[in-house]
Amino acid sequence: MAVLGSLLKGGIKFTSTLQKIRRVKPLKWQKKAFTKLIAKARYTQFGEKYHFDEILSTAIFEKGTEFYSKFQELVPIYDYNKIYDEWWYKARNGEKNVCWPGRIKYFALSSGTSDAASKAIPVTKDMIKAIQRTSINQIISLGHYNKLPSNIYETGYLMLGGSTALNEVDSHYEGDLSGITTGTLPFWFQNFYKPGQKIAAERNWGNKLEEITENAKNWDIGFLAGVPAWHTILLEKIIKRYNLKNIHELWPNLTAFAWGGVSLEPYKQGLERLFGKPVIYIETYMASEGFLAYQDRPDGNLRLVLNQGLFFEFIPFNENNFDEDGNLVAKPQTLMVHQVEEDIDYALLISTCAGAWRYLIGDTVKFTNKNRAEIKITGRTKHFLSLCGEHLSVDNMNNAIELVSKDLGIDIREFTVLGIKHPPLFAHQWYVATDDKVDEKQLCELIDKKLFELNDDYAVERGHALRNVFLKVLPTKAFYDWMKHKGKEGGQHKFPRVLKGKLVDEWQDFIKKNYEKVGV
């Protein structure tokens, strides 16, 4: 009998019940989180310049949301380049009390997609504690998952991320966020954590997969966590090495898969071919800037973390606030969590206990349950396609790919879309990765048809300015070779769903040079 597992499950279920009883309204939680952030940062260089003492006074002594009006009035909106060039570079050079009290010991080098260089994001002790508390709350929320057996809490937790090895640079350390947080894992979790500190520190992605595969036979894995694409590659490698029909022959207790950073839809069918029985999927929203949201119930979406060192703002993602390239206008409309509406796309601003202030993180979200502050990620501000008003989101693309994959019974691992000029008007160029046999023309027509059904604006523009849609099928290897070529292989790296700017020519040149034999 899994005694420890039974005790853990019982404790988790009891605690999750208490959480339900103590549930607080989103606005009250956010005002409390905001007040703590402003109070702690008011004597920093940033806080003094933007009059945090005045904002704090309003938050403490004025009722309602006057504090937010004052915050909007006094503090500008920042993107990464602006806040780094004005503030974070000083903290990275060793200055104290820049945007958060004290000296910053860690900087997370964000993985991002292959369309950008890594960004250096400050990670404070307060942020590490906030991430740990949120992680514990997510574990507690497992009490809502009645189908999880007791013994699952005694099995291994395989986290597939970037290298946990950190680089010492002057007075601080830099590296993947997983390296920073793994070094601070609670002692009781060390026995459950796989692949273990030594393998996790491996910088060579191919070597890391090989070492995990070699040790897989010695582990009893109950949880998987990481980006779906790389887990798919790993599981295929393990199944091939040990001549298995599916991964459950080796890990019979594998019960749950936690993922984040991308939509699961394009990968789900391929993953389920590797499983021998159903697996519970649990979504998380972890960024280098913080642990922003997690799925806390089986039928729910991502729930914003409103009480752990994060303050959220929302900008309606429309032509009033963004230009056609996804750039923010000078004075956009911003809203608090209680002011949003369901089923509308919002760009996300965050202020955090790591010294990010009114920071445009680049993601777009849509509220699915306002009362519970539940959201779904719909894309990136720069990854929407709207050449002529079609307003095609990554969420639309993911849904279309999922539906077409099911209809045709094929496994589509990756895809990307380009907006191109097709004189005298415009067109979309799709590149789709599958190793299954499929007719390109049929696949293109089906995707186009699904998008007609999913997006009214797309349907309208397909009869006007968006006259053509083109599609090329590529082997899955082409996409992963591109990631390797860009130095973005493995870990938390994701292939961008929309390519723009110079990456369009780079991608097309890469395909022509390396994959001409497949008809490109």
Image: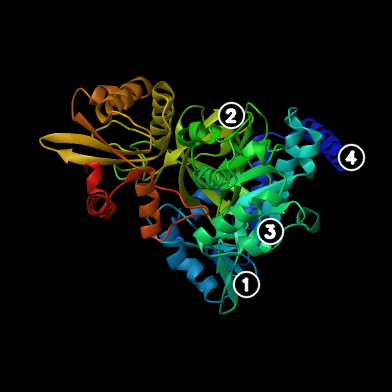
Mark 4 lies on residue: 3
- The crowd level at tag 1 (other Cα within 10 Å; few <14, some 14-19, many 20+) is some
Q: Label 1 amino acid?
A: Arg
Q: Disc 4 or 2, which lies upstream in sequence? A: 4
Mark 2 lies on residue: 370
Q: Position of residue 297 (x, y in %)?
A: 67, 30
Task: Point out the frontmost of discs 4 and 2.
Answer: 4
- The crowd level at tag 3 (other Cα within 10 Å; few <14, some 14-19, many 20+) is some
- Disc number placed over residue 443 in the picture, else none: none
Mark 1 lies on residue: 103
Compute the Cα span from label 2 to label 3.
39 Å
Looking at the rendering, which quadrant does residue 381 occupy?
top left
Rendered residue at 53%/72% (across/down): 92
Q: Position of residue 86 (x, y in %)?
A: 45, 67
Compute the Cα span from label 3 to label 1.
30 Å
Compute the Cα span from label 4 to label 3.
24 Å
The answer to whether the residues at label 3 and label 1 have Cβ atoms under 8 Å apart is no
Task: Point out the frontmost of discs 2 and 3.
Answer: 3
Q: Label 2 amino acid?
A: Lys
Q: Label 4 amino acid?
A: Val
Mark 3 lies on residue: 196
